[in-house]
Image (cartoon, grey):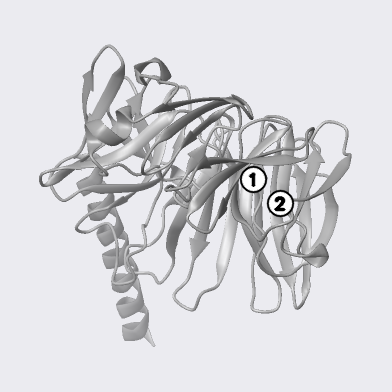
Amino acid sequence: MKNRKIVVALMVVLLTVGVGFAIDKINSKDMRVVKENDRTQYIGEDGMSFYSMVDTPDKIYTLIDTEGDTDTYRIAKAVYAIDKQTGKMEVVPESKKMKFGMDGIDSTFGNEDYLGWVEADADGATRTVIYDIKQEKILKKWNSSDAHSFFDFHVIGHRGYWLESSGKTGLVMSYDLKTVEEEQLDELGAEGTVLAFSEHKMWYQDIRRGSGHLKSYDLRSGNYEIYDLGVDYSDLKPVGDNLVAYSKDNGLYLYDTKLQKSALLNGEDNGIKANYDGKGLIVTDQMSYKIERLDGIRYSNTIESEYQDNHLFSTAERIQSLLFITKVGEHEEIIRMNQDALRWSEK
C-alpha cells in the first residue's frame, strides 16, 4: 500500500510538471507586434497556429496549436490571452487542462465582458463555460450528454443564448449572467437550426414550418416575427434589424423583412464561409459587402486581394472587428484591420 501511494504521488508530480512545462513553453513565445496605419500584426513563431478567437478592447483570446500544446486528439489545453499592446501571452487560469488528460478546449466565444469556451472529452462529452473577464472567475457551466445536449452558444450584452436538444425537441434558451435567470424562448425542430444576431435581433430557421421560413426575436421587446422566404436556404447572415443575407445554391441573397422581398447579392459567392458584424458588414472568402438597404450595396476585395484567399475569421458568432488569421511562410499572424482600410466601390 505504501509503495502504491508513492507511485501515485510521483505520477501526480510528473503530470503537474508536464503541464507547467507545456504552459511555460507557450508563455516563452510572446507575439511580436507590428503596428501600421490601418492594421496591427501579431506575429507568432514558426509552427504556432491560432484558431477560435475573441476580440476585446485590451486582449485577444485564442486557442493555440503548437508542439507540446495539443495532444493526439488535436485539442487545446488552455485559452490564451494576448495583450494587444505588448503581445505578451498568458493563460486564462480557469481554462487550463492537464497536459496528458483526455479533455481540452474545443472552441471559444464571447464579447468584451464575458469569455466562453467549450470543453470536450475524447468520448465526445462537452462542457460549456462562461467566464467573467473582469472578475476572473467562471460564472456558469453547462454539461452535455448523449441524451441532452447544449450547443451554438453566444453572448450578447449580459445574456447567453444557446440551443438545447433532447431527443426530437429543440429549444432556444437564454440565461441572464447578472440575475442568473434562465428562460426558454422557443421550441423548434431538434436539427438544422443555428442562431445569428443583428444589433437588436436574433434570427433562426423555424424548421417546424418548413425550410423556407425565417424567424426573428427582438432582444429588447421579446417579440417574434415570422417570414416565408419561399425558397430553401441556409447560413443566415444578418446585416441589420430588417435585413438578413442567406445562402441559396451557389449565390448569396439579401432579404428585406419590411418589403418581404429578396435580391441577389452575388451569384458566384454562396457566402458559406461568411462572417458578419450585424450592422451592415459581411466578409466572405471572396468579397466584402457594406449594405445599407436592398438597393444600397458597396463592394470591396481589399482583404481578399491583399491576403489572396489566405485569411480566416475564426469565430462562429458575429465579429466585433476585422480580426483574422493569415499564414506567412512557416508562421501565422493575427491581423486586426481597421474598417477604413477597406476600399469600397459600387461594382
* 291, 18: nearer the viewer: 291
- Is 111 in front, or is 238? 238
Q: Position of residue 280 (x, y in %)?
A: 57, 27
Say which quadrant the N terminus sits in: bottom left
In the rendered image of this protein, does residue 234 appear above or below residue 90? below
In which image quadrant can residue 309 be found?
Answer: top left
Residue 214 visible: yes
Decide if residue 241 is on the left or right side of residue 93: right
SS at badge 2: strand
| Mark 2 residue type | Tyr
**Percent position of residue 198, x then y:** 66, 34
Instruction: Residue at 47% x, 44% y: name it.
Output: 274
Tell me which label, 2 or 1, sits earlier in the chain.
Answer: 1
Q: Residue furthest bottom?
A: 1
| Residue 86 visible, this orientation | no
Q: Which residue is mark 2?
A: 204
Q: Residue furthest top?
A: 37
The residue drawn where x is 32% and y is 69% is 100
How much space separates mark 2 and mark 1, taking CA atoms?
6 Å
Label pair 2/1, CB-CB below 8 angstroms: yes
* Quadrant (top left, top right, bottom left, bottom right) of the C terminus: top left
Say which mark, if any, is on residue 196: 1
Question: What percent of the width, then of the height, locates residue 183?
Answer: 84, 50
Q: Position of residue 13 (x, y in %)?
A: 30, 64
Residue type at tag 1: Ala
Asked if residue 270 lies left or right of residue 151, the reply is left
Give the residue at x 33% y 31%.
Answer: 301
Q: Nearer the viewer, residue 243 or 319?
A: 243
